[in-house]
Amino acid sequence: MAAQPEGADATSRHRLLGALAIVVLAVLGALALGGVDRVTHERVERNAQEWLIERLNLLVPPTARDNDVFSDKAFAIAPDLLGIDRPIAVYRARKAGQPIAAILHTTAPDGYRGPIELLVAIDAKGSLIGVQVVRHRETPGLGDAFENRHRDWLPKFRGRSLDDPPQQRWAVRADGGDFDAFTGATITPRAIVKAVRRSLEFFRAKRETIFQAPNNAEIR
Amino acid sequence: MSANSPAPNYSTPPDVLALFALCPLLAVSDTLANAISSSVAMLLVTIGSTAIAAFLPRWLYDETRFAALALIVTLVVALLSLLVHAWLPGVFDALGVFLALIVSNVLLLVQAEATPGAPVRAFASAARTSIFVIAIMLILATGRELVGRGSLFRESDQAFGAWANGLHLQLFREDMGFLLAVLPPGAFIALGLLFAATKWWRRRLQHEQ
């Protein structure tokens, strides 16, 4: 194989062999990746699920409900109310058959660095229990740990509803609303306030359907 | 045999090479836990890639060899990130895009060290540079975490398991920390200070002689 390329013929044959080596390498690599992906895929899914359940439990603790909130879910498809085209998971917490809370797994599409996934928990009367950031694309070290650095910002939503503050003041202060933005950033707070307000509006409009819809049904 | 693939004569001195190899990783030297996990990841990728690259046929042209090396390093990093995503989700989240960025520094190392036909030498040389990089990462992380967050080994349970919570040392309150040290520019400033310190130290040794 260790041919000394002499003349154009040998050179082109050599190039062909090189290309072939790359192709073989790529095929072997693809097979290896596919194999490892098969092994890890399930576990990655399970991790994400456990993580979500943990967050749901933080918002509505198991003592406050008697159903399995993770599997008691429906899907909201309401682009006009929520501003998102794709279906959104709505988890329902109940106790003795009575609705306790709904948790919307929604998205604030207009965050500073792309969409921010949120969990918005609303109690049966339409007041906020809490808001949690699930995932946001941010560079580690650069404006990261939004939840840590602005630890006191998200809890301010607790107890708020569409009447408190009045609907037209559901905005950050820079836009004439009631919510503080944090220093050096208005875009992310603005996006989150808007997404939370939309979730509340959706809840008010569809409250009955949210709790009556069968499992995995669509709410339109 | 060597006519078409002469031993590459890269004259880049090893510490300059290590400096280049360091840059993509610098940003995750913000805590000791991140520095250790990214360094270990880099070491694993270097070892894995050099081992696979040793099987490359010797007659590959330099261009083809580089493409092959790029493919190998990317493959090893992709495999590693799948495994980390599955079994160390905390580390996966903490390192984020920087896990994939390991490709660039390892490719730099492996490319410069890959002497066709001398796998052992390539291996030793790549290992030496990686260890140099890891040492710098650890020094930077210690300084940055201490100054920026007032702690050592915070959140290291994500990477090493619950026992690592015992390592966590909080010297002063986190929000009293110097934020710049934690942000990426802080990494470069810390690196500059480190260089200044080593230079000063060398000069002092020279004076004493």
Image (cartoon, grey):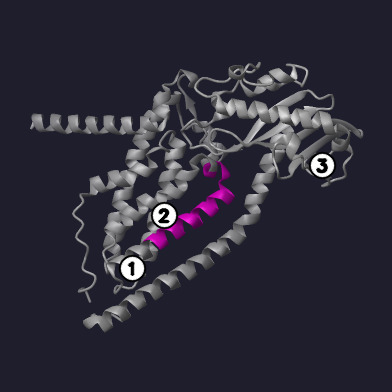
Q: Element under label 3? A: loop
Q: Does the segment drawn in magenta span residue B75?
A: yes
Q: Is residue A204 left or right of residue A1?
A: right
| Residue type indicated by callout 1 | Thr
Q: Residues within 10 Å of mark 1 (few under 14, many from 20)?
A: some
Q: Element under label 2? A: helix
- The answer, for residue B199, to whether it is visible in the render is yes
Residue A72 image offset from top left, x and y in percent: 82, 42
Q: Quadrant of the C terminus of chain B?
A: top left
At x 75% / y 42%, what residue is drawn? Answer: A89
Residue B135 image offset from top left, x and y in percent: 33, 41
Q: Is residue B170 left or right of residue A69?
A: left
At x 49% / y 19%, what residue is drawn? Answer: B175
Q: Which residue is mark 2?
A: B45
Badge 1: chain ID: B
Give residue A220's mark.
Answer: 3
Residue B91 image offset from top left, x and y in percent: 52, 43
Judging depth in this view, the residue of B150 and A159 nearest the camera is A159
Point out the tag, 1 or 2, that comes first from the N-terminus: 2
Residue A84 image offset from top left, x and y in percent: 69, 40
The quarter of the picture where residue B193 lies is top left
For the residues labelled 1 and 3, the Cα–Cα distance comes to: 56 Å
Vertical relation: B90 (above or below) B7: above
Dominant SS in magenta: helix
Q: Nearer the viewer, mark 1 or mark 3?
A: 3
Q: Which residue is mark 1?
A: B64
